[in-house]
Amino acid sequence: MHRRLKHIIIAVICLSASAVLHAQNTKAQEEKRARLEKEIAIIDRQLADNKSKSDNSLADLTLIRKKVSNRKALVTESDRLIRKYKDDIYLTQLKINKMQARVDTLTEYYSRMVISAYKNRDARVWYMYILASDNISQAFRRMGYFRNLSSQMQDEARRIRQAQEDLEAEKERLAQMKKDAEDVKAARVKELDELKKDETKANAVVKKLNKDRKTYQAQLKAKRKEVEKLNKEIERIIAEAVKGKSQPAAPGKKKTEVDPALAAEFAKNKGRLPWPADGPVVGTFGVHYHPVYKNLKLPPNNGIDIAVSKGESIKAVFSGVVQQVMVVPGYNQCVMVDHGNHYTLYCKLKSVSVKAGDSVKTGQTIGVIDTINGQTQLHFELWQGQKAQNPENWLQ
């Protein structure tokens, strides 16, 4: 009897643990899906702005392909979640079957016990059993047994009812799990439909770029000049900052010192820095080739470009001192923050809430993003001394 109850308790514990693990995994996947969907919403708004304010097909193609990438990731997540639901449903059903069998066995056992007690309810039989005791101590024990028999049976009945309630709760959880699995399958079908539409749009943009090659190559030439001007200006400013820390200060000026503690702390946080803004990366670090004109090299990107919502606040990724606030054509206002021997740059800002010499803290707002030619994108760079780093390797 007790062994059977123990098995039921173990089964309930296993089911509960499985439910907790399932909930944790599902929550993580739901958070990832929510992030991907939010990025797609941001991209959709930027595509709408581009359509009404500019004719930059390369920018459109970049956004659409990022959107396609997110759609594929959503489908992959849906597939993974569906497989998990299928496995969990199967295992939970097995455990429910075992619990049901144990409850049935206990119910039958106690039913026989109650029937037996009913058949032997004649008080004269009980009295004879007590009178047949070998001594007074045994008689008291037998009297106690009959007095407690009813109470024990009621206790065991309550335990069975509790086990049945737990079983019903698991059945309800299983039913909800099956419903959730169906919802995910339906969402997957919808994502696949949207994915096909996005891929069709991307193909249309590619055809347009191929048709008007000369026009877009001229646009690309103008863009290259903007990027080169930005890169030269940033390289000049960083070179001056590094030089100012290694050489004696000019007469009447205070020398800028490297803060070794800050520099070391910044380096220790590689891979754990918070993002300066919330949104998808639509421009990656380094040198790339045109997605359509395969032999045409694009302007080098010394940072990353993050698509963000209009009016979003841009935040410092780490504590430091504002080195400079500058204006660069095509990139509007830029803020450069000194973190010891590392530097971060935040460009394409509409307004700035800091000035040179200000101390900033991690997560502090340094400005608000601007929308330039229909694009609301933060250009973010991270330098170690005079060497540009891939920011994605530093951000969490």
Image: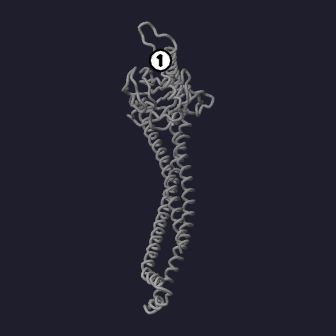
Snapshot quadrant of residue 204: top right
Q: Is residue 293 left or right of residue 133?
A: right
| Residue 331 makes an appearance in the image | yes
Graded by Cα atoms within 10 Å as few (under 14), some (14 to 19) or many (20 or more), the crowding at tag 1 reads few
Residue 159 in picture, x, y percent from top left: 46, 72
Q: Nearer the viewer, residue 9 or 244?
A: 9
Q: Is residue 83 left or right of residue 277?
A: right
Q: Nearer the viewer, residue 169 or 216?
A: 169
Q: Nearer the viewer, residue 140 or 115?
A: 140
The coloring applied to the image is: one colour
Residue 256 in picture, x, y percent from top left: 46, 16
| Residue at point 49%, 10% (across, down) | 248
Write down the residue under mark 1.
257
Please say if 236 is above or below 130: above
Q: Residue furthest top?
A: 251
| Residue at point 46%, 30% (across, down) | 318
Please say if 130 is above or below 32: below
Q: In what element is the residue under mark 1?
A: loop
Query: Is the N terminus in the top left, top right, bottom left or bottom right quadrant?
Result: bottom right
Q: Identity of the amino acid at label 1?
A: Glu
| Residue at point 56%, 52% (across, down) | 80
| Residue 283 makes an appearance in the image | no
Q: Residue furthest bottom?
A: 124
